[in-house]
Image: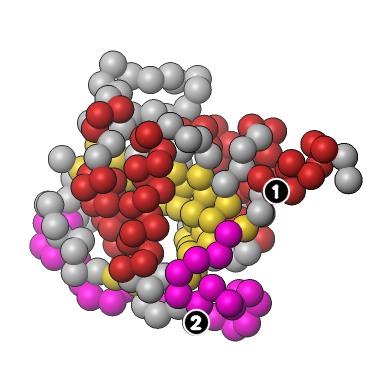
Amino acid sequence: MPARTLAAAVALAVLAGGCGAGDDWSRPHAKPTAVGSLAPGFSDPATTPTPESTITPRPGSWDGVRPSEDYRVVLLTAGQDPQTRTLVDAVRAWAEENDVDLRTIAPTDPHQYVASISQAIRLRPDLIVSAGNDLIDPLAMVSPNHLDQQFLVVGAELAEPTENVTAADWTGASFRGEGLGMSSTYDPASFTPERAGRAVRAGVAAVLNGLTGIVIWLD
């Protein structure tokens, strides 16, 4: 096998972890549901947020929500910068806490980013969580063609998300793609474990409750 092909294969290897890691996900799988309820203040109960809109939930209003048993999640991540590592750690900690069946795809070659997203989709997870600014532009290309697959972007957002792409970020986490660059509010120091954990929990709670295609803005 040529060196480049071998490197790509290694980069796209799926790492299994969490509850049910021995399941190849080929067996029938019940549609996931939210266990628990959103508290008042997460969103306006009289109005369903429209795609591309932004909501600012009351802090902690998502804490009572967790996924049902056997929730299947692919963590898609690229980059070794401290911000991305903080986000990855937050996703893994949440998955461990909630007995989520988590698989990780971590491409290292930028030429493989689009392929890695396609690989994640082929696994047919309940949710794909993206961590790392390098994946924003590839996600913007691929996600509109797979509206039946739910995505959650943490610590960044797509400039024009479709209804299947939800984002959770905050002041300081403002990356929206290479064409738009970093805004003046981008602050690497804002990527704390506590804030990243809140973004994951709030974002998943929104997806489980059908509030998708929106930006969840955290204080």
- Image x and y of residue 115, in percent: 69, 45
Label ID, residue 30: 2
The answer to whether residue 213 is above or below residue 27 is above
Asked if residue 59 is among those painted magenta in the image, a careful observer would answer no
Q: Residue at x 40, y 80 (%)?
A: 69
* Other-residue count near label 1 (Cα within 10 Å), few / some / many at <14 / 14–19 / ≥20: few
Q: 179 and 163: which one is in front?
A: 179
Name the quadrant of the C terminus. top left
Q: Residue at x 35, y 42 (%)?
A: 86
Q: Residue at x 58, y 59 (%)?
A: 15
Determine which residue is flagged by label 1.
10
Q: Quadrant of residue 85?
A: top left
Marks 1 and 2, how far apart in space? 31 Å
Q: Residue at x 41, y 70 (%)?
A: 100
Q: Mark 1 belongs to which amino acid? A: Val
Coloring scheme used: secondary structure
The answer to whether residue 148 is above or below residue 116 is below
- Image x and y of residue 112, in percent: 68, 39
Dot in front, 1 or 2: 1
Query: As drawn, which residue projects farthest toward the right?
Result: 1
Q: Classify mark 1: helix, strand or loop.
A: helix
Left or right of 11: which side holds 82?
left
Q: Mark 2 belongs to which amino acid? A: Ala
Residue span colored magenta: 15-42
Q: Earlier in the sequence, mark 1 or mark 2?
A: 1
